[in-house]
Amino acid sequence: MIKEMRIFTCVTALGLALALAGCNGTELADLKAALEKTESERDNLQTQVNTVTKTRDLLQKQVNELADSRDRLEQQVTELTGSRDQLQKQVKGLTASRDALQNQADELTLSRDAAVVEARNAKQRIDALATQLDAETKKVSELQSQLKQVQTAIAELQKKFTL
C-alpha cells in the first residue's frame, strides 16, 4: 500500500513537472487543481495508512496476548496432564488394593461360612451327645436304683443267714 502511494506520488509529481514545463495559464490552474486533488488523495491515503498501521499494531498486540495466553494454557494442559497421569496411577494402585481387600474379604467370608457349618455340625454332635448323655444318665440312675435294691436284698439275706 505504501509502495502504491509512493508510485502514485512520483507519477503525479513527474506529470506536474512535465505539465508545468509546457503549459499555459489555464493548464497551470488545472494542474494546480489536480495537484491539490492528488495531495488531498495522498493525505487521505496517508490517514488510511496510519489507521491501518494502528489497527495492525493493535491486532499484533492482540496476537501477542493470545499467543501468551495460548502458552499459559498449554502449560496448564501439560500440568493437568501430569496430574491426570498421577491420578490414574493412584486409581490403579487403589484399584489393586481394593481387589486385594476384596479377595481377603471373600476368603474371610468363605472361612466364616466354613466355621458356621462346622459350628452347626458341632452343635448337632453336641446335641446328639447331650441326648446320649441323658439316656446314659437315666440308665446309670436306673442301675444305681437297681444296685440299691440288690444291696438292700443282699443285706436282708445276710441278716437272714446270720440269724
Image (cartoon, rainbow, N blue to C red):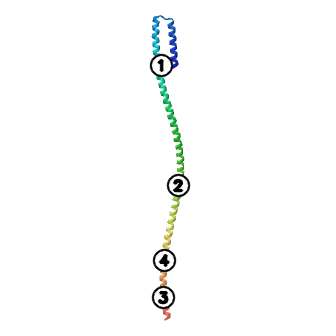
Residue in front for this viewpoint, 161 or 57? 57
Residue 152, image x, y percentages? 47, 87
Which tag, 1 or 4, sits closer to the chain's start?
1
| Three-letter residue code for mark 2 | Leu
Give the residue at mark 1.
46
Between circles 2 and 3, the one closer to the viewer is 2
Rounded to the nearest whole Å, what is the CA distance between mark 2 and mark 3? 74 Å
Mark 2 crowdedness (10 Å alpha carbons): few <14, some 14-19, many ≥20? few
Tell me the residue that label 3 is attached to. 153
Residue identifier under label 4: 137
Q: Which residue is drawn at 53% across and 45% down?
A: 86
Above/below status of 133 relative to 23: below
> What's the CA distance linking mark 2 and mark 1?
80 Å
Q: Earlier in the sequence, mark 3 or mark 1?
A: 1
In primary-sequence order, the first of circles 3 and 4 is: 4
Who's the residue at 52% across and 55% down the image? 101
Q: Are marks 2 and 3 in contact (CB under 8 Å)?
A: no
Q: Give the residue number, with chain letter if any, for mark 2.
A: 101
Labels 4 and 2: the sequence-earlier one: 2
The residue located at (46%, 20%) in the rendering is 48
Q: Is residue 103 placed above or below 81 in the rendered structure?
A: below
Q: Nearer the viewer, residue 36 or 96?
A: 36
| Label 1 environment density (alpha carbons within 10 Å; few <14, some 14–19, many ≥20) | some
Contact between labelled residues 4 and 1, with CB atoms less than 8 Å apart: no
Please state the horizontal and vertical placement of residue 2, each as a whole percent of the image: 51, 19
Q: Earlier in the sequence, mark 2 or mark 3?
A: 2
